[in-house]
């Protein structure tokens, strides 16, 4: 069994995000190409974006720290620390309204 601190990883990735031109940093914490389930920790500086993209499967975003907005062409949802947002099947983007750390969980389509 593996165990790690999402808080510590969040701090590490926020530091990396502060140095990155994109204002973000991410790393897989569980799963990957050989698994159906993938969990990725994403840190975003305030104002950073994840441009519009398709979801590779069913997905949720758990906001660990900060405040973010997930938007489609039709609507948007704001998430605060402790909130879980279900990612729609539609194209969507993510905007960090303040320094934010999220845990993205995706189950790949088969």
Image (cartoon, rainbow, N blue to C red):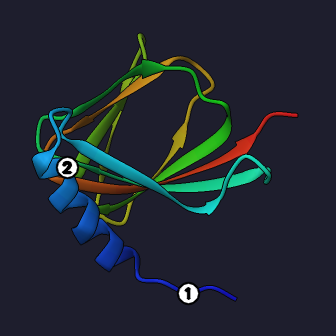
Label 2: few (<14), some (14–19) or many (≥20) C-alpha neighbours in 10 Å: many
Label 1: few (<14), some (14–19) or many (≥20) C-alpha neighbours in 10 Å: few
For residue 77, the mark is: none
Label 2–label 1 contact, CB within 8 A:
no
Q: SS at mark 2?
A: helix
The residue that appears at 63% across and 25% down in the rendered structure is: 89
Q: SS at mark 1?
A: loop
Quarter of the picture containing the N terminus is bottom right
User: Is 54 above or below relative to 41?
Assistant: above
What percent of the width, then of the height, locates residue 58? 69, 39
What percent of the width, then of the height, locates residue 76? 36, 27
User: Is 85 above or below relative to 57?
Assistant: below
Q: Which residue is mark 1?
A: 3
Q: On the image, which quarter does residue 65 sit in?
A: bottom left
The residue that appears at 27% across and 60% down in the rendered structure is: 13
Q: Which residue is mark 2?
A: 17
The residue that appears at 79% across and 54% down in the rendered structure is: 35
Quarter of the picture containing the C terminus is top right
**Res. 63 in view:** yes
Q: Earlier in the sequence, mark 2 or mark 1?
A: 1
Measured Cα–Cα span from mark 2 to mark 1? 23 Å
In this picture, residue 70 sits left or right of residue 38: left
User: Is 88 above or below relative to 30?
Assistant: above
Q: On the image, which quarter does residue 75 sit in?
A: top left
What percent of the width, then of the height, locates residue 60? 56, 48
In this picture, residue 1 sits left or right of residue 34: left
**Res. 66 in view:** no
């Amino acid at each position: 069994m593996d165990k790690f601190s999402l808080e510590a990883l969040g701090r590490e990735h926020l530091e990396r995000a502060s140095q990155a031109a994109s204002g973000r940093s991410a790393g897989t914490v569980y799963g990957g190409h050989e698994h159906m389930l993938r969990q990725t920790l994403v840190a975003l500086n305030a104002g950073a974006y994840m441009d519009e993209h398709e979801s590779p499967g069913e997905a949720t975003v758990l906001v660990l720290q900060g405040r973010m907005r997930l938007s489609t062409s039709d609507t948007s949802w704001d998430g605060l620390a402790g909130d879980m947002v279900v990612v729609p099947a539609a194209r969507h983007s993510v905007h960090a309204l303040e320094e934010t750390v999220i845990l993205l969980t995706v189950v790949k389509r088969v």
